[in-house]
């Protein structure tokens, strides 16, 4: 292994930059040449590469986003694009590829790596925390703290004006962010893709809370389970109580990575390079029970089990 490449793909996540820094600097310390691929799979298809040195990654450890840029690349599903990407790998004598991204990125890396014999190692980075077999993806902790800070602010208005709020957080297929902020924010209910909502109970709880004199009520909804605006309307109609909707959206994806997101990124960067040096391929490195371990891509891309009922019951018990 002499030359490796690194790319970021899918939605940006806070901590991608520290992960790039770690891959580049640790790779160089192991006498590897490290090349950055711009714009995810697009960069491989269109030969957009940058040779990195130690200084190329200076000053990025505390920055959200990714200096390599990122994006979704549906074209990478076609054979023509994959052939072009493989030609770039051959032309630039790249011996191994590190893919920083989420579920969709690992699915692509799994197919591309096995089909063309390119050793690929994944570093899980997505605010959704949707990679199976590991505890935490890079960026989730930052996104949760950003959302939580907004929810704390909303609580002030909810309490002062005695209102119900429905707050929509990110999470297309995975309700992890919603469960985490609902518990940490002391929220009264949460709606996620993994659990079918019991609307009658939700309305009943709100009305009973109101009768008891409860002055604020926050329902968190993961975007994959419904839209805040529709749910707020539904609640107003069913309970006759004033309900407002807030969509937190992309503010959750940006911003300075927290210490947890940075440390995780820096540790996983090292582990991914080591993995390539050991001759490993077709797997992701990830945090599991406080240790870094390997998870085959085939396992990592399965639907993640988030113990939704356990979180939900705790949230409801503590409100
Ligand atoms: O990266 C994960 C995520 O933020 C999801 O929570 C969300 O559904 C999706 O990305 C949004 O994707 P895009 O940035 O392509 O609109």
Image: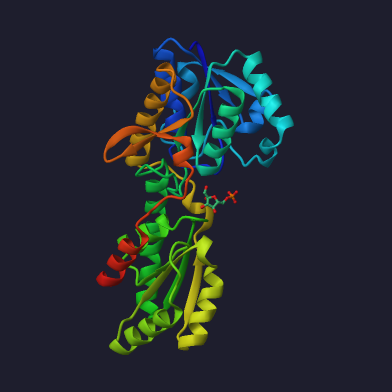
Residue 115 vs residue 4, the one in the foreground = 115
Dividing the picture into quadrants, the one containing residue 29 is top left
The residue sitting at 45% across, 87% down in the picture is 239
x, y percentage for residue 223? 52, 61
Instruction: Please tell me in which quadrant of the rendered image residue 213 appears.
Output: bottom left
Residue 297 horizontal/vertical position (percent)? 47, 36
The residue under the point 53% across, 67% down is 226
Residue located at (39% from left, 63% from top): 151
Q: Position of residue 127 (x, y in %)?
A: 45, 47
Q: Is residue 69 visible?
A: no
Colour treatment of the image: rainbow
Residue under the image location 36 percent in, 70 percent down: 156
Q: Is residue 37 left or right of residue 193?
A: right
- How many numbered dots are placed on residues in this image? 0
The answer to whether residue 275 is visible is yes
Q: Position of residue 214 (x, y in %)?
A: 31, 82
Q: Residue furthest right?
A: 80
Q: Nearer the viewer, residue 293 or 203?
A: 293
Which of the image's four quarters has the C terminus? bottom left
Residue 10 vs 161, above or below: the answer is above
């Amino acid at each position: 292994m002499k030359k490796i490449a690194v790319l970021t793909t899918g939605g940006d996540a806070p901590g991608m930059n520290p992960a790039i820094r770690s891959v580049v600097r640790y790779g160089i310390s192991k006498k590897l040449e490290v090349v950055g691929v711009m714009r995810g799979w697009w960069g491989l298809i269109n030969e957009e590469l940058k040779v990195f040195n130690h200084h190329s990654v200076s000053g990025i450890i505390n920055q959200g986003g990714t200096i390599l840029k990122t994006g979704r690349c549906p074209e990478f599903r076609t054979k023509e694009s994959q052939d072009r990407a493989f030609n770039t790998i051959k032309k630039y004598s790249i011996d191994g590829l590190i893919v920083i991204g989420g579920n969709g990125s690992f699915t692509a890396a799994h197919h591309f790596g096995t089909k063309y014999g390119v050793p690929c190692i994944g570093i899980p980075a997505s605010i959704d925390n949707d990679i199976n077999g590991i505890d935490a993806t890079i960026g989730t902790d930052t996104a949760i703290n950003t959302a939580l800070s907004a929810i704390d602010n909303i609580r002030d208005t909810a309490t002062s004006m005695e209102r119900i709020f429905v707050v929509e957080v990110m999470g297309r297929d995975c309700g992890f962010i919603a469960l985490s902020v609902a518990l940490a924010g002391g929220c009264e209910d949460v709606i996620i893709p993994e659990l079918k909502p019991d609307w009658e109970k939700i309305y009943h709880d709100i009305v009973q809370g109101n009768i008891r004199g409860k002055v604020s009520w926050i329902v968190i909804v993961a975007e994959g389970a419904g839209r805040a605006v529709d749910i707020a309307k539904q609640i107003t109609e069913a309970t006759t109580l004033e309900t407002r909707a807030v969509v937190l959206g992309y503010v959750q994806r940006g911003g300075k990575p927290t210490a947890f997101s940075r440390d995780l990124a820096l540790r996983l960067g090292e582990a991914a390079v080591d993995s390539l040096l050991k001759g490993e391929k077709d797997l992701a490195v990830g945090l599991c029970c406080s240790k870094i371990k390997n998870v085959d891509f085939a396992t990592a891309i399965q639907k993640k089990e988030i113990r939704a009922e356990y979180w939900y019951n705790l949230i409801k018990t503590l409100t």
